[in-house]
Structures are given as C-alpha cells and as structure tokens.
Amino acid sequence: MSELLSVRDLTVRFRTGSALSRLLGRAGHVRAVTDVSFDLAQGETLALVGESGSGKTTLARAVAGLAQDVSGQVHFEGRDILELGAAGKQRLRRDVAFIFQDAVASLSPRYTIRQLLAEPFQIHGVACDDIEAEVIRLLEMVSLPASMADRRPHELSGGQARRVGVARALALKPRLIVADEPTAGLDVSVQGEVLNLLNDLRERLGLSILVITHNLNIVRHVADRMAIMYLGRLVETGPTETVFHDPRHPYTAALLSANPVVDPEAVPERITLDGEMPSLIARPDGCEFHGRCPFARPDCATVVPRVTADGARAYTCRYPVGINATTPAEAPDEKSPA
C-alpha cells in the first residue's frame, strides 16, 4: 500500500493563563501533543487509543490542518500541510473528512437530510450537475433508503443518524476519514453494523481511516494497526493483533487487561494503575508514566525512554512487559525507529 499520511515529530501547543496575562505577554504554553511520529497507508485503518485527555482528538485535528500552534512535519500525499496556504488548506478539508462523536448533535436540526448531504458541495464550491441524484447515491452507499432524504435529524434513530454522518463525510470523495468514537451512544448490535459499514466502505473506496477511540473492541474489529497515546505521546504502535497478544508498554498492557474478554473461562490478570493521568502543565520527569506504572524501577523517574523499534512495532519503555508479566523484562537494545 502506498503512503497517504506521514507524521514526524509533531507537537501541538496550547496557550495557558488568563486573558490579561496573555495581553501582557505573560501567558505560558502547554504541549498537548509531543514529538509524535507515525505513517498511514492508503486503504489502511489506524486506531488512536487512550484515556480521555491523552491527546487523541488534538492529534487528529492537527493532521487535518485544524490546529493552530503546530510544529514538526505532516505530509499528506507528499505535501506538508503545515506549509499550505489558504487555498491548499481548503483543498485539504475536502480530502480529509470527519465523522463526529455525537451523531445527532453534529447534524443541524433545521435541515432535512437532503440539505445536510448537499451542504458540503455548497460550502466548498464544488459543482454538481444533479444534486438530487448525488444525495440518493450517498444514502445508498450507507444503506439508507431514498425516502430518508425528507426527514430531519430528530426523526432518526442513533444508527440512522450515524449513517447520515458517514454519508455526509463521503460527499466530496475524501481520501482520509477521521472517525471520532464512531459507535458512541449506540446499542451493541448497531455498533457492529456501523463498524461493518466502515470496513466495507474502506474496501470499496480505498479509504484510509483514522479511528479515535477508547473502546478496544472497536479497535480489534476495524483497525489494521493501533497507536496508544498517553499524555500526548505515542507510547506504543504496531499491528493490532500483535499488540493485543503481546503488548510491550505497561500502559498498553493495563488497558488490555481491563478490556472485557469473550471467553468466559479466560481469567486475564488485571493490571491496576495508580492514580490519574498527570497534568500537562506539570509533566513528570523521566518516563512520564512511571508514577502510575506497577513495574516502574527507580531510574524510570529520571531517565526518558527512547523509541525502541521492533519490526513492525515501536514502543517507549526501557523495561517492556507482556500482558501476563508480573515483573518487567530486561530492556532490549534501543535503536531509532525504522
């Protein structure tokens, strides 16, 4: 598969302090995303996983050109989006579409479904000879009847609203879909239908999908690879099944150990994390996870772990563990990412 998105050393900062301190030039900055690097191939699904506040949505907005104070490199189809002018960014917003977390709230209650699906063409000034035919085509793509075009969002079920959101995202034939918690608020049976729809569309249209979620069952259903975020950093990336069966970072292992398993006879060992995620304003020294890590050693509080590349995966831990480990393994030789 050819590379669609390449991110290197991406950092996103937010300004802190009151309006007065900003006016006086005394405001500080906080890094919401720090030194993130990853690739996304055409036709591939990558899942960003982590607790609330880990930086997943901020990272997704940055790669879509929607964040303000950004440094590093973000190449989309070979173009560095951080260097794009107004016209280039407008084009990028046609190539990168969002599926928002709240399916109903993301659809204006004042519009019919027909108007909602036609709106992207108007916003971006894209000519369409037969907008009615385009609306019907989009509804068919997400397995909704043409009669749905006359309804308004409040008349839809959660699953139908989600499908309309997917259809709207597909209107301008994007190359990348960013799906923020695509099954939030849906019944389990409907969740499966939505995930199957995303898989089907990816195969039919050659889409790349960036899924933002904390639901590991979703990851296993749709993602080729997964990237675990903690405090704005990627702490582990790799093929989904590989990471599920043999996580290397203690944070990944803890998330997986808390995930419900299908096998009723399986008794996974639960890895408990101490406390809550630290504040971005006061990042810990050394490994930023050491204060919550059950396997931390004294030097973890002072030594910053480098990225260790291990075949198709990478992780930032000096003492990698497996999900059933009770003591940390010896650290392998560290090297630069491949």
Image (tube, rainbow, N blue to C red):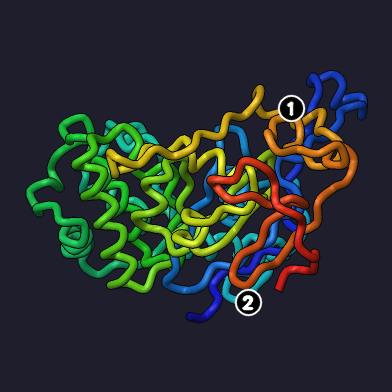
Q: Is residue 15 above or below residue 83?
A: above
Name the residue nearer the viewer: 259 or 321.
321
Any mark on residue 51, and which? Answer: none
- For label 2, the crowd category at 10 Å Cα-Cα, with few meaning under 14, some 14 to 19 and many 20 or more, is few
Quadrant (top left, top right, bottom left, bottom right) of the C terminus: bottom right
Q: Quadrant of residue 27?
A: top right
Any mark on residue 78, and which? Answer: 2
Q: Secondary structure at mark 1?
A: loop
Residue at far bottom of view: 2
- For label 1, the crowd category at 10 Å Cα-Cα, with few meaning under 14, some 14 to 19 and many 20 or more, is few
Query: What residue would you read off at disc 1?
Result: 279
Q: Which amino acid type is shown beneath numbered disc 2?
A: Gly
Question: Residue 105's spot in the image, x, y percent?
Answer: 35, 32
Q: Secondary structure at mark 2?
A: loop
Horizontal placement of 197 versus 212: left or right? Answer: left
Q: Nearer the viewer, mark 1 or mark 2?
A: 1
